[in-house]
Image (cartoon, coloured by chain):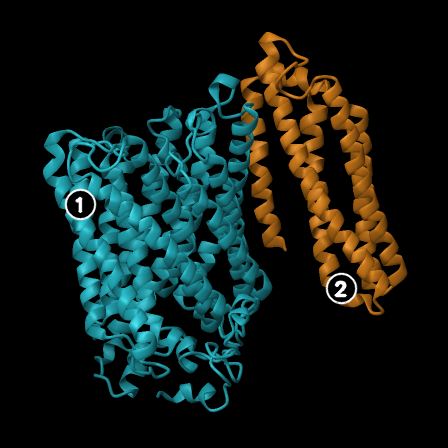
Chain colours: A cyan, B orange
């Protein structure tokens, strides 16, 4: 056990896991660590429900004809997949689980600033999730996750209202989580934890929270307007009633494009932590990394119009949005270059979390580059609403966010549970997921280029070859996602106990025992050094000494 | 609390944005329709709400200088004015309904202006309705603060709570300050 870890071990008290064993002690907890676990359980359920819907869709698409489900069922399946994955899995995935668990630990705090609000946000999430799930299972919704008007208000006979209510409630849980993080990061930092000593994971959550707080209310109010229009048949979005359907799309994407950054910014935070740790190098260009995340959050608010290039938006507006969409690629590219530079001359080891992180960089780049294709006005006319778009955002959200989420789970699993998982299985699953993911989604880029439109359950016979590839990949991918579920669950009881700092990583969260005591820190920590002080620490632990030129500059 | 208010601003922002777009589409219908709103009651409500913000500000100050009874009284007055606002708003809704200003069914405006005017009143109801819901929450908060202040020996403990309730109250007031000219005044110049 490393020296600072002795801090809490001697007199830190019981671990948060054993501090109260009744179900009620979990359901009424104010401990950010326990709430993180509650969130993790809930989103895992939703992930597998949404994943099952996707698997069914891919099986249907193995042949050009409709042989498994009808057109209507297919519509309901992809709506269910989209709604669950976006609002009930991806948005809360990293912030509400890993973020909830780690942000207070990383800044040296006892808890979030508003613990009761944190618990309330979980209950809101569960209630909203239950309503949405009920709407999706008791008949389903056929509008697609985007709820475009006037279809969603006038023509759809499915459970649109219930789904709207569910998402509305879930939205408040996001707002409360974001609000809590902002207040916590401002007010609960330990002595010496200045803004530029914050781990990038915390910076990422700060940027994410700003988006959560400022974008989600727009969605909430848009859904209210949509709901009133649907019920009262009077409206602002329906052209037959004098409304403007483009207005709905503007308002919807004003939330939903920044929402992409809600999903990917925390992922970038995780990857920064993992890369620095397993390259044994301080992160390259720390400040530019922090500023890049803030820049992404800010510019990300100004690019929503690129979803409306072919919807009838003014061409001058489209030009501006196109330009801004290219601009937002700059900070993203800065991050990719900085991660690569962090690897340079590092002592790289390929543990499971590192495999996920490296996978993230590759897949995020492929997805991001495809985004530039779509941001180009003329090209977008050809690619809009094809499988190219589907492949693009799955590379960002699944290849990016889900990879990083799993990487983070594998990185902090010993800290969260106090147990180690079988390293070989971890590495195998990471590699399998990487390849089966590409197997599934790369063919979709080609299909989109060839002109196959999205959201149909049938397609022209010439597309079959690539679709079979994609469907086969999807089945392996689905099996791959079950693997961590199995061996991580196994490790909860059988895994060997983990020391406080199994990866020899920097960061305050590794200075407390695994699993951490309820009160986090026995003595409030004081921070005296910059984050990611890697080579020095690695050397002092008997790891290979890096060349002198790579020693960190003192900040 | 400031962060929460930032969030709320965006929440109302959607409505104002929708109002702006709709107004640009139907300038004539909007100006005709907004002349039918009840200026007297709207102005009365503006006065009530502005007064309530004064008593709210004084209430927070009273707690700060540890004048407990004064604080409890001022907070109660604030909550009471909030209730008065809601009551006036209810009367106004009733009058609007009687004049067939609620969209759908028999509507006060005929064909060329009808769809625009319906849109106006639909927005009018939604915007004032959402505002009224916020105000009702504010009444509950401030009323609760008044009761707690009256019962407690050391009201200074509630300072943070009352300050937050006050911020919220002023925010809701401010929303009305924007709603009032948009819905009642602009077309009457």
Residue depicted at 51% across the width and 85% down the height: A13
Q: Secondary structure at mark 1?
A: helix
Res A288 seen here? no
Q: Nearer the viewer, residue A18 or A462?
A: A18
Q: CA distance from mark 1 to mark 2?
A: 60 Å
Q: Give x and y (percent) for residue A441.
A: 20, 46
A453 to the left or right of A98: left
Q: Give the side of residue A264 with respect to residue A372, left or right.
A: right
Q: Residues within 10 Å of mark 1 (few under 14, many from 20)?
A: many
Of B157 and A507, the residue lying toward us: B157
Residue A344 rendering spot, x and y as whole percentages: 21, 68
For label 1, the residue is: A471
In the picture, the quarter occupied by the C terminus of chain A is bottom left
Viewer-closest of A157 and B128:
A157
Percent of width and height locating residue A127: 52, 52
Closer mark to the observer between disc 1 and disc 2: 1
Residue at x-position 84% and y-position 51%:
B76
Residue A205, how many percent across, how many down?
44, 60
- Chain label for disc 2: B
Where does label 2 land, which residue? B158
Q: Residue furthest bottom?
A: A10
Contact flag, marks 1 and 2 (Cβ < 8 Å): no
Q: Quadrant of residue A318?
A: top left
Residue B94 vertical placement versus A475 (above, below): above
């Amino acid at each position: 056990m490393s020296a600072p870890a002795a801090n809490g071990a001697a007199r830190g008290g019981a671990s948060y896991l054993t501090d109260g064993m009744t179900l009620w002690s979990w359901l009424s907890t104010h401990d950010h660590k326990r709430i993180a676990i509650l969130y993790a359980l809930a989103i895992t359920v939703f992930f597998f429900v949404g994943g099952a819907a996707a698997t069914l869709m891919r099986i249907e698409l193995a042949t050009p004809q409709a042989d498994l489900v009808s057109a209507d069922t297919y519509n309901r399946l992809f709506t269910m997949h989209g709604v669950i994955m976006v609002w009930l899995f991806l948005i809360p995935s990293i912030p509400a689980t890993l973020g909830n668990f780690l942000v207070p630990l990383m800044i040296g705090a006892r808890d979030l600033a508003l613990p009761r609000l944190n618990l309330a946000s979980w209950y809101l999430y569960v209630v909203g999730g239950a309503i949405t799930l009920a709407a999706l299972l008791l008949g389903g919704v056929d509008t697609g996750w985007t709820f475009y008007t006037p279809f969603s208000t006038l023509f759809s006979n499915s459970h649109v209202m219930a789904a709207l209510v569910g998402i509305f409630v879930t939205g408040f849980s996001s707002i409360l989580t974001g609000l809590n993080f902002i207040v916590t990061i401002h007010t609960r930092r330990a002595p010496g934890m200045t803004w530029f000593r914050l781990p990038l994971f915390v910076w990422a959550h700060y940027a994410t929270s700003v988006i959560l707080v400022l974008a989600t209310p727009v969605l909430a109010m848009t859904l209210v307007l949509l709901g009133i229009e649907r019920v009262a048949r009077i409206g602002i979005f329906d052209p037959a009633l004098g409304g403007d359907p483009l207005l709905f799309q503007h308002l919807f994407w004003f939330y939903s494009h920044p929402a992409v950054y809600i999903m990917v910014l925390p992922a970038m935070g995780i990857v920064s932590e993992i890369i620095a740790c397993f390259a044994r190098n301080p992160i390259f260009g720390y400040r530019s990394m922090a500023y890049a995340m803030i820049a992404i959050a800010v510019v990300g608010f100004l690019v929503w119009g690129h979803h409306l290039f072919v919807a009838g938006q003014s061409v001058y507006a489209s030009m501006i949005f196109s330009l801004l969409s290219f601009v937002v690629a700059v900070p993203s590219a800065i991050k990719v270059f900085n991660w690569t530079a962090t690897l340079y001359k590092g002592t790289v080891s390929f543990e499971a979390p590192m495999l996920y992180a490296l996978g993230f960089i590759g897949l995020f780049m492929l997805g991001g580059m495809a985004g530039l294709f779509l941001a180009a006005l003329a090209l977008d006319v050809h690619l809009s609403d094809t499988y190219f778009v589907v492949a693009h955002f799955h590379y960002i959200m699944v290849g990016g966010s889900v990879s990083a989420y799993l990487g983070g789970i594998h990185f902090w699993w010993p800290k969260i549970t106090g147990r180690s998982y079988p390293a070989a299985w971890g590495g195998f699953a990471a590699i399998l997921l990487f390849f089966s993911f590409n197997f599934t989604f790369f063919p979709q880029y080609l299909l989109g280029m060839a002109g196959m439109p999205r959201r149909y359950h049938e397609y022209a016979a010439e597309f079959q070859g690539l679709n079979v590839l994609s469907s086969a990949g999807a089945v392996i991918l689905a099996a791959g996602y079950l693997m961590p579920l199995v061996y991580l669950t196994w490790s909860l009881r059988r895994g060997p106990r983990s020391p406080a700092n199994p990866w020899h990583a920097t960061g305050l969260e590794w200075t407390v025992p695994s699993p951490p005591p309820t009160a986090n820190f026995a003595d409030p920590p004081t921070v005296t050094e910059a984050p990611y002080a890697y080579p020095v620490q690695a050397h002092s632990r008997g790891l290979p000494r890096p060349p002198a030129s790579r020693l960190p500059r003192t900040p | 609390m400031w962060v929460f208010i930032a969030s709320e601003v965006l929440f109302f922002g959607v409505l104002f944005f929708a109002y702006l777009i709709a107004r640009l589409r139907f300038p004539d219908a909007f100006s005709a329709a907004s002349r039918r709103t009840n200026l007297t009651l709207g102005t009365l409500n503006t006065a009530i709400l502005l007064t309530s913000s004064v008593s709210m500000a004084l209430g927070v100050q009273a707690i700060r200088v540890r004048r407990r009874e004064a604080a409890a009284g001022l907070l109660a007055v604030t909550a009471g004015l909030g209730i008065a606002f809601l009551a006036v708003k209810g009367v106004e809704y009733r009058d609007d309904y009687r004049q067939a200003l609620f969209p759908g069914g028999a509507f006060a405006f005929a064909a060329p202006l009808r769809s625009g005017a319906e849109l106006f009143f639909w927005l009018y109801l939604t915007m004032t309705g959402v505002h009224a819901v916020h105000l009702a929450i504010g009444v509950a908060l401030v009323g609760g603060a008044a009761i707690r202040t009256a019962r407690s020996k050391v009201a200074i403990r509630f300072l943070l709570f009352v300050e937050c309730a006050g911020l919220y109250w002023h925010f809701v007031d401010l929303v009305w300050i924007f709603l009032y000219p948009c819905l009642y005044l602009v077309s009457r110049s």
